């Protein structure tokens, strides 16, 4: 039985490919999940903060659209909390976090000109 270079290289490529597929099946998803609990908590906190800020932006935009001519848009912390629960799936939203996100977006979007909020109370 004679071994050719092409046959050995082909077998080696097949073995390496099967090994990579097996490793992928065993470790599926591990690359995107943090290994440390502290990193997982930090990632969750970033996602929560992002959801609050997006919800505040959406609530401000909706209030501006629904306001009539010459009347201010009313933006409430309750609306931000409700949107984070309904759209982003958070069961518990702290009112102070929602108020802080709303204040941040309120000031960034120059809403004092045409909006009224209860985030400062």
Image (spheres, rainbow, N blue to C red):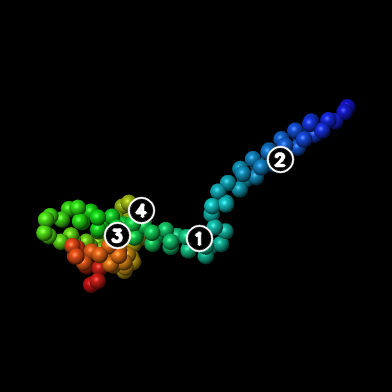
| Separation of marks 4 and 1 at Cα, in angstroms | 18 Å
Task: Specify the label residue 56 is tagged with.
Answer: 3
Task: Please report contact status of discs 3 and 1: CB closer than 8 Å, yes or no.
Answer: no
Q: Earlier in the sequence, mark 3 or mark 1?
A: 1
Quickly name the residue at label 4: 88
Task: Specify the label residue 40 is tagged with.
Answer: 1
Residue pushed farthest bottom? 121
Task: Specify the label residue 14 is tagged with.
Answer: none
> What residue appears at the point 25 percent right and 65 percent down from the top-left corner?
110
Badge 3 element = helix
| Separation of marks 2 and 3 at Cα, in angstroms | 50 Å
Task: Please report contact status of discs 2 and 1: CB closer than 8 Å, yes or no.
Answer: no
> Is 67 placed left or right of 56 in the picture?
left
| Image quadrant in which you'd find residue 14 | top right
| Separation of marks 3 and 1 at Cα, in angstroms | 24 Å
Residue 61 shows in the view? yes
> Is 7 placed left or right of 79 in the picture?
right
> Is 69 placed left or right of 23 in the picture?
left
Task: Specify the label residue 16 is tagged with.
Answer: 2
Q: Residue 79: x percent and y percent?
A: 25, 58
| Separation of marks 4 and 2 at Cα, in angstroms | 42 Å
Viewer-proximal residue, 106 or 25? 106
Q: Earlier in the sequence, mark 4 or mark 3?
A: 3
Q: Nearer the viewer, mark 3 or mark 1?
A: 3
């Amino acid at each position: 039985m004679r071994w050719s270079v092409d046959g050995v290289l082909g077998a080696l490529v097949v073995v390496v490919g099967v090994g990579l597929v097996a490793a992928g099946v065993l470790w599926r998803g591990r690359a995107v999940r943090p290994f440390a609990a502290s990193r997982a908590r930090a990632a969750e906190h970033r996602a929560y903060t992002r959801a609050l800020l997006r919800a505040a932006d959406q609530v401000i935009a909706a209030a501006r659209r629904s306001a009539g001519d010459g009347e201010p848009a009313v933006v409430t912390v309750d609306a931000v909390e409700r949107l984070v629960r309904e759209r982003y799936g958070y069961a518990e939203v702290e009112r102070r976090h929602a108020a802080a996100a709303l204040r941040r977006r309120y000031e960034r979007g120059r809403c004092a000109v045409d909006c009224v909020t209860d985030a400062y109370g």
